[in-house]
Amino acid sequence: MRAELRSLTKEVARLNSHNFIRMHNSLPKVLAFNFARGLVFGLGSVLGASLLLSILAWFLSQVEFLPIIGEWATQIAQQIEAAMEAN
């Protein structure tokens, strides 16, 4: 029983000396770590979204279907106006 208790005590001491545990024992360290993590996540999200949207905009500028959509929207607007005048 004593050997098991010593072994358990030694293991707990080893775990307490682990960097993760030492960092999370201090509130300022936890706050600083999470703040830095949030900044990096936010920056990565903004850069990723910017890159994705710029690629999407470039791709859409290469496709020549916008006049078709414009004509379709004009027809819809004319039908709506005609329906409103009829009522």
Image: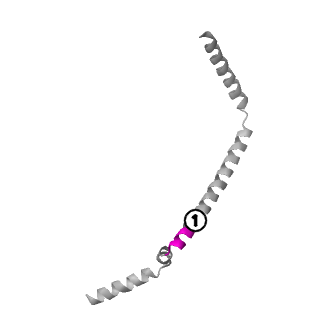
Q: Where is residue 41 in the image (x, y as percent from the top left)?
A: 59, 60
In the picture of the structure, the residue carrying the numbered disc 1 is 35
Q: What stretch is highlighted in magenta?
A: 26-33
Give the residue displayed 50% in from the left and 78% down from the top.
19
Name the dominant secondary structure of the magenta segment. helix
Q: Where is residue 45 in the image (x, y as percent from the top left)?
A: 62, 55
Mark 1 Cα shell of 10 Å, populated few (<14), some (14-19), many (≥20): few
Residue 7: quarter of image: bottom left
- The colour scheme of the drawn protein is one colour
Question: Quick one: quadrant of the N terminus?
Answer: bottom left
Give the residue displayed 73% in from the left and 44% down from the top.
58
Q: SS class of the residue under badge 1?
A: helix
Left or right of 48? Residue 27 is left
Q: Nearer the viewer, residue 31 or 18?
A: 31
Left or right of 70? Residue 25 is left
Amino acid carrying mark 1 in the image = Phe
